[in-house]
């Protein structure tokens, strides 16, 4: 899985990404159905800082969002809208993979801002490729909640078991 994620960060159309997104879409649909909860109708790809976006040339979370939305619409009849204009990253900070868990939480605090007149009361899902400590996704979620979102779920294709208890 590590190699797939690394390839995704360098090549947004790595062959495995479609299969991983299809599996995630099945899991998402089943989870909401089993819990008898409505699936969020708005997907927000985790934004990159503009400098990183310029350097990389694409946002892998946006590509994952497009594939997930297509699968959920087609296979599970879920109505979804992808919104890249609601949340943006305002602090660049260090690459998270270079930091301890404690430093991840502090370096990413208040790194995002959410602005949308139509966000109030919405249930949204943040989409990211990997969740390690959750610091980045949680920071974005807090910004969305401050802006009026009713609920923020986090969807990712991978969750690491990385844990640094001394972090």
Image (cartoon, rainbow, N blue to C red):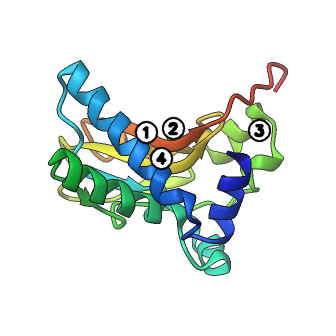
Q: Nearer the viewer, mark 2 or mark 1?
A: 1
| Residue that appears at 34% across and 67% down | 85
Kindly state the secondary structure of the residue where label 3 is placed: helix
The count of marks equals: 4
Kindly state the secondary structure of the residue where label 1 is placed: strand
The answer for how far apart the CA atoms under marks 1 and 4 are is 10 Å
Q: Nearer the viewer, residue 74 or 123?
A: 74
Please indicate whether residue 88 sits to the left or right of residue 146 in the image. Answer: right
Kindly state the secondary structure of the residue where label 4 is placed: helix
Q: Are marks 4 and 2 in contact (CB under 8 Å)?
A: yes
Q: Are marks 2 and 1 in contact (CB under 8 Å)?
A: yes
Q: Which is nearer the N-term, disc 2 or disc 3?
A: 3
In the rendered image, which residue does mark 1 sit on?
154
The answer for how far apart the CA atoms under marks 2 and 1 are is 8 Å
| Residue that appears at 47% across and 53% down | 19
Q: Which is nearer the N-term, disc 1 or disc 3?
A: 3
Characterize the local packing of mark 2: few (<14), some (14-19) or many (20 or more) Cα atoms within 10 angstroms.
some
Residue 8 image point, x, y percent: 62, 62
Q: Is residue 128 above or below residue 153?
A: below
In the rendered image, which residue does mark 4 sit on?
140
The answer for how far apart the CA atoms under marks 1 and 3 are is 21 Å
Q: Is residue 27 above or below residue 74?
A: above
Characterize the local packing of mark 4: few (<14), some (14-19) or many (20 or more) Cα atoms within 10 angstroms.
many
In the rendered image, which residue does mark 3 sit on?
103
In the rendered image, which residue does mark 2 sit on?
138
| Quadrant showing the N terminus | top right
Q: Nearer the viewer, residue 42 or 27?
A: 27
Q: Which is nearer the N-term, disc 1 or disc 4?
A: 4
Characterize the local packing of mark 1: few (<14), some (14-19) or many (20 or more) Cα atoms within 10 angstroms.
some
Q: Nearer the viewer, residue 152 or 146?
A: 152
| Residue that appears at 36% across and 65% down | 84
Quarter of image, res 30 = top left
């Amino acid at each position: 899985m590590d190699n797939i994620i690394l390839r995704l960060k360098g090549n947004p159309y790595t062959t495995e990404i479609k299969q991983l997104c299809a599996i995630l879409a099945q899991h998402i649909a089943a989870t909401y159905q089993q819990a008898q909860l409505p699936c969020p109708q708005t997907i927000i790809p985790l934004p990159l800082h503009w400098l990183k976006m310029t350097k990389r040339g694409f946002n892998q979370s946006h590509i994952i969002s497009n594939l997930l939305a297509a699968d959920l619409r087609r296979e599970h009849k879920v109505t979804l809208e992808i919104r890249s204009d609601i949340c943006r990253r305002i602090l660049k900070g260090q690459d998270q993979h270079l930091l301890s868990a404690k430093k991840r939480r502090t370096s990413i605090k208040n790194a995002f801002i959410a602005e949308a007149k139509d966000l109030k009361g919405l249930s949204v899902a943040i989409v990211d490729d990997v969740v390690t400590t959750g610091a980045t996704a949680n920071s974005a979620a807090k910004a969305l909640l401050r802006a009026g979102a009713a609920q923020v779920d986090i969807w990712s294709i991978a969750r690491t078991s990385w844990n640094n208890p001394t972090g």
